[in-house]
Amino acid sequence: MNASAADRTAARARVLSIIRENFVERMPFHRLLGIDVLSLDHDRPELAFAMREELVGNYVKNILHGGVISAVLDATGGLVAFLGVAQKLSGKPIEEILARFARIGTIDLRVDYLRPGAGSRFVARGYPLRTGNRVAVARMELFNDEEQLIAVGTGAYTVW
Amino acid sequence: MNASAADRTAARARVLSIIRENFVERMPFHRLLGIDVLSLDHDRPELAFAMREELVGNYVKNILHGGVISAVLDATGGLVAFLGVAQKLSGKPIEEILARFARIGTIDLRVDYLRPGAGSRFVARGYPLRTGNRVAVARMELFNDEEQLIAVGTGAYTVW
Amino acid sequence: MNASAADRTAARARVLSIIRENFVERMPFHRLLGIDVLSLDHDRPELAFAMREELVGNYVKNILHGGVISAVLDATGGLVAFLGVAQKLSGKPIEEILARFARIGTIDLRVDYLRPGAGSRFVARGYPLRTGNRVAVARMELFNDEEQLIAVGTGAYTVW
Amino acid sequence: MNASAADRTAARARVLSIIRENFVERMPFHRLLGIDVLSLDHDRPELAFAMREELVGNYVKNILHGGVISAVLDATGGLVAFLGVAQKLSGKPIEEILARFARIGTIDLRVDYLRPGAGSRFVARGYPLRTGNRVAVARMELFNDEEQLIAVGTGAYTVW
């Protein structure tokens, strides 16, 4: 790897680190849910979070509240939308990329609850379905630590 | 009001108080969001919650995270489904009614985000669209303290 | 009514007549379904169509195919989106308004099927939920001739 | 293959042939759309249909009407739901299986339109996401003859 390739790799690592910081540290509700960024791969980024008592919906069955699931899937879809934008702006100043991050908004979200949200740790994965200049559409999946598919979702996002 | 009418009113008040307790006190994620029950009218129940820093999604604009909105609308739709069941079981022992509460599950949810979630207090209202023996469908709306419609949603729920 | 008011009324009638023609005559699938425009009120436009054998889904129960319902609700939501655009472009040349019509596209659609689609004639009504410069969101309802609510839907549309 | 294996194969072929006949010949709206059954594999059944003038939505662009797409995806999801039921009832009399077919109903449907529906022939494919005793959930995809993904959808179906 020559000097300029090393530079580009370092620049990309710095961008990813800033995205991660913005996505977790500066979004209070993500901190409340305990969301961690596992992967910023624009083709299938991943988030993770641990079960804890505050996230329980059904006190009899000790499973995740449906609202926790919809919140994490919305966050995952928003990350897919943002990474699509970041990909297109590759090479631009990080400030310009982050300015777009703050403008991304969810148009709508659908969540299908397939199995009770039982487990001690959950991973959400997103996939781009449409990466337009104005609207992005993402598909999302939530798995528990036994690799069971708990829920799937689809979201449309503004990306201008 | 004669004695038996007073009895029925007292019984109904007790049922509503138990529902409220179950919905808030025993559902940890509802406590985390700060959800309060405003109305248990089965035709249009209402929940409310206050803005606070932990519920913010966009740190630039100081607005609700989309996941908070989807979580509250899911809770509202689940309440509509449960009140439909409770209505049908009217007169049955409260234990039987509450046992059904724990079995209600969200099949799927759609949320449309119409305006940024700015405000200091929010009210969610639900309406029954279908009150079947196996599936209930509800429509939900979220308003801020200026009566602006922030988001709408639709959810399907199992009620067996 | 003075001359210029009469002129404006005549101009508006001409625009509506052209919209109607475009919506039915030039959209072959609308003709196949037998869709008729009842109202072009931008706050709640209405379409209607008659039951006929080709639109049946369930040959045992003689009810509308779910796909007919989703198609009509999509058409209704698209009409809401277009009328919102037309409203904003009020006073512009009809060619400019119609050019926008051809660019409207459905981003996504949700349909909730509430009752079997039994009846001899159906009316679909739409309501604007969001009338943005890039995205419009509409809510739609389908009634049979006994005023029973058969299905509801929500759609997001591009309007640029 | 011994005699009884041959019998089972013949029985299964007969069941599939009857399903195909019911799905196309006895569902008038499927005939109107020109739907053909490509595969009855319960893990990923496929339908196909050809472009024709009546299915066009946008007369300028010569693309499928969104309502055609939603109708075909709904039909595909219903087929997934039915094949899940048929799988569970494997070995039961064909009359019993078909009686369940007539009872399957769409609870709700979401369609995401990803690309303009341009092409001369389209294939819709379905996948089971949840195969319960009361509710089935399916994911659907529509491709054109260049293998481009035109639209995706998710549907919930009653299967009792």
Image (spheres, coloured by chain):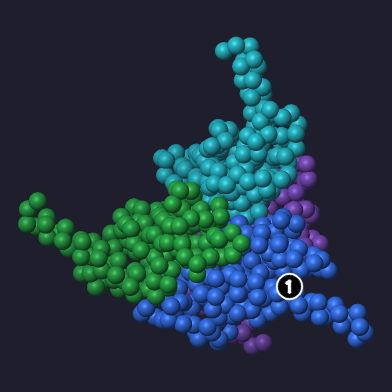
Chain colours: A blue, B green, C cyan, D purple
Name the residue nearer the viewer: A1 or D38.
A1
- Determine whether D31 is above or below C102 in the image: below
| The image quarter in which residue B97 lies | bottom left
| The image quarter in which residue C104 lies | top right
Residue, x 60% and y 71% (percent of image)?
A26
Return the residue at label 1.
A42
- The location of residue D22, given as percent across then percent down, is 57, 60
The furthest residue to the left: B3
Residue, x 44% and y 39% (percent of image)?
C145
- Determine whether C17 is above or below D97 in the image: above
- The location of residue D41, given as percent across then percent down, is 64, 73
Chain letter of the residue carrying label 1: A
Amino acid carrying mark 1 in the image: His
Name the residue nearer the viewer: A8 or B153.
A8
The C terminus of chain B: image quadrant: bottom left
Drawn side of residue B137 relative to residue B61, left or right: left
- The location of residue D108, given as percent across then percent down, is 52, 59
- The location of residue B146, given as percent across then percent down, is 45, 48
Residue, x 37% and y 73% (percent of image)?
B27
Where disc 1 sits, the SS reads loop
Residue, x 63% and y 67% (percent of image)?
A77
Neighbours of disc 1 within 10 Å: few (<14), some (14-19), many (20+):
some
- Determine whether A52 is above or below C110 in the image: below
Drawn side of residue C5 relative to residue B125, left or right: right
Drawn side of residue B68 relative to residue D67, left or right: left
Q: Is residue A4 visible?
A: yes
Q: Is residue D96 visible?
A: no
